[in-house]
């Protein structure tokens, strides 16, 4: 014959979590949170890259518009640029070449201000129609990135 004490121990069911189960759950949760943090960081990186690329596209398009507005400047857009009183409020009438140098100077300053380690270059190839290569280079994750466009702008 069994005593009451033996019957209770034999029919008793375990309830609740053990310490090992709680630690395993904590590890699984931690790995998941690290994964979410990694995805969030990659999302931030991708959005920054997209922002820089958008800025570069807009800057290259702006230079193409400057060239279209001053078609006679032609090869003067390939130089380093120069500070000239050609802009609004300037007291001097500028030649198309001087205006091109002024445009390049302003544009390169914009590239430097709006992109990390930004550099803007313009090359000119005479032909029918003349072809310009506008390149914007900046530092991004993984090294230097370049956006390049090649508009053909006739003299008219």
Image (cartoon, rainbow, N blue to C red):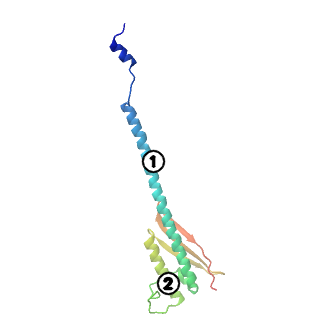
Secondary structure of residue under mark 2: helix
Secondary structure of residue under mark 1: helix
**Residue to which mark 1 is pinned:** 35
Instruction: Say which of 156 and 140 sits in front.
Output: 156
Residue drawn at x 46%, y 92% is: 92
**Residue to which mark 2 is pinned:** 101
Residue drawn at x 46%, y 84% is: 82
* Image quadrant where one finds the C terminus: bottom right
Residue 22: image location, x then y, percent: 38, 35
Q: Is residue 131 above or below residue 44?
A: below
Residue 130: image location, x then y, percent: 62, 80
Residue drawn at x 58%, y 79% is: 124
> Which numbered tag is attached to residue 64?
none
Q: CA distance from mark 1 to mark 2?
A: 51 Å
Which of the 4 image quadrants contains residue 148?
A: bottom right
Mark positioned earlier in the residue sequence (1 or 2): 1
Q: Is residue 43 above or below residue 156?
A: above
Residue 112: image location, x then y, percent: 44, 73
Q: Is residue 40 above or below residue 11?
A: below
* Mark count: 2
Q: Is residue 36 above or below residue 103?
A: above
Residue 121 visible in the picture: yes
């Amino acid at each position: 014959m069994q005593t009451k004490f033996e019957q209770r121990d034999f029919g008793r069911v375990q309830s609740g979590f053990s310490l090992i189960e709680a630690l395993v759950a904590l590890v699984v949760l931690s790995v998941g949170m690290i994964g979410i943090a990694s995805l969030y960081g990659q999302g931030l990186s991708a959005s920054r890259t997209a922002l820089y690329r958008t800025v570069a596209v807009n800057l290259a398009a702006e230079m193409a518009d400057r060239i279209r507005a001053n078609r006679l400047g032609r090869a003067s857009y390939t130089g380093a640029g120069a500070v000239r009183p050609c802009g609004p409020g300037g007291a001097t009438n500028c030649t198309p070449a001087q205006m091109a140098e002024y445009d390049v100077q302003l544009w390169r300053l914009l590239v430097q201000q709006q992109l990390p380690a930004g550099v803007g270059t313009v090359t000119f190839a005479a032909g029918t129609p003349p072809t310009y290569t506008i390149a914007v280079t900046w530092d991004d994750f993984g090294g230097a990135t370049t956006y390049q466009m090649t508009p053909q702008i006739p003299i008219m």
